[in-house]
Image: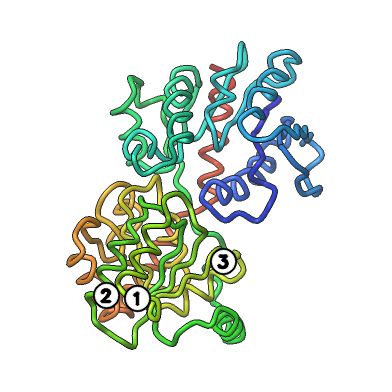
Amino acid sequence: MIIGIDGRELSGQKSAGKAVYVREVLPRLFARGRQDKFVLYVDKDVPSDLPANVRVVVCRVPGFLWHFFIALRINLLREIDLYFAPTSAIVPTLLVGTKSVFVVMDLVAFLFKEKHTTATATLERIFVPLGVKRAQKILAISENTKRDLCRLFPLESSRVEVTLLAARDIFSKQAGLNDKLSVAVRYKLPKRFLLFVGTIEPRKNIQRILEAFKALDDPSLKLVLAGAKGWFYKEVFDFIEREDLGGRVLWLGYVKDADLPALYALSGALVWPSLYEGFGLPILEAMSAGTPVVTSRVSSMPEVAGAAAVLVDPRNTEDIMRGIKKALRSRGLFVKKGKKQAARFDWDKTAQKTWQAIKGAGVL
């Protein structure tokens, strides 16, 4: 079988969920498909150390148009038997006579449209339903996402396979003293701090984190925000200025992967009461690194965290505050539970289920 894959996330230094997924799963698919051939469709150069059965097609067309050029190429050349889309449903909806499998990372555009950029939400609301209708198999990254899919769209649950994510190996390796000192000095980290990791956007519920942090009334405790500015980020920084929290809240911007394990390990707890997640990778990253986690009891987060985190109502500031206190008070217990919980998730299992779904779809 010849399998085409959207491999755009293989290039660059992104550490968001989609990029992590692609970089962990694709090499494992190549290893499992030694008897098959792959065509990797990208928009810029990718690492050259790919297996011999992987051919790279570079289409340097920007943004949205890239999908149409790739779909046109596939329809004209008939060079693949099946297209695997790990990040977008657009190409699968445009294919004629070529089977497809695509991954649904989340359904923000349908459940939290007001907390997404208008352009992105509009595109997803157009193409995801079409992709769901036309794809031979749909992969959801959590049981919660599968439930949402089956609730929102008329499809049989048997067409949706759950392929859970996992923390990368870099987080389970204990950060050394030198790594911690280097990260602490480079980012000018305070001695005691709570941590948030993720894009600064409304869905991440950062304003309530700030409100809960302020209510703690612990002058020696700081809050560190690690993540790039996303959409509607201004309200977060306006709140910090309005509440005079500038001296107690440190924004690091984007933090590269190599520094994240030490950053997690240095923090008192990861505070992550998101309003909605397709999965929630930072939960497992923090647990693997030995950091207590405070997260939401809604969406996919209880599924990921299990009983190893402090679960809170993300819309209740007081509950978030109580959760933080509990995590700090029982740090040792949650570190132990967290490491055990994170070890339950494995990228090899994810890749195996993904490969089975692809091969199964290829014979439908």
- Tell me the kind of residue under disc 3: Val
Tell whether 98 sits left or right of 240: right
Q: Earlier in the sequence, mark 2 or mark 3?
A: 2
In which image quadrant can residue 268 be found? bottom left
- Depth check: 173 or 32 in front? 173
- The circle drawn on residue 255 is 3
Q: Position of residue 306 (x, y in %)?
A: 30, 58
In which image quadrant can residue 185 be found? bottom right
Rendered position, 313 above or below 252: above
Tag 3 and tag 1, C-beta contact below 8 Å: no
- The circle drawn on residue 214 is 2
- Tell me the kind of residue under disc 2: Lys
Tag 2 and tag 1, C-beta contact below 8 Å: yes
- Seen at 31% across and 59% down, the residue is 273
- Tell me the kind of residue under disc 1: Leu
Q: Which residue is mark 1?
A: 245
Tell whether 141 sits left or right of 186: left
- Depth check: 283 or 306 in front? 283
How far, Cα to Cα, is label 3 from label 1? 22 Å
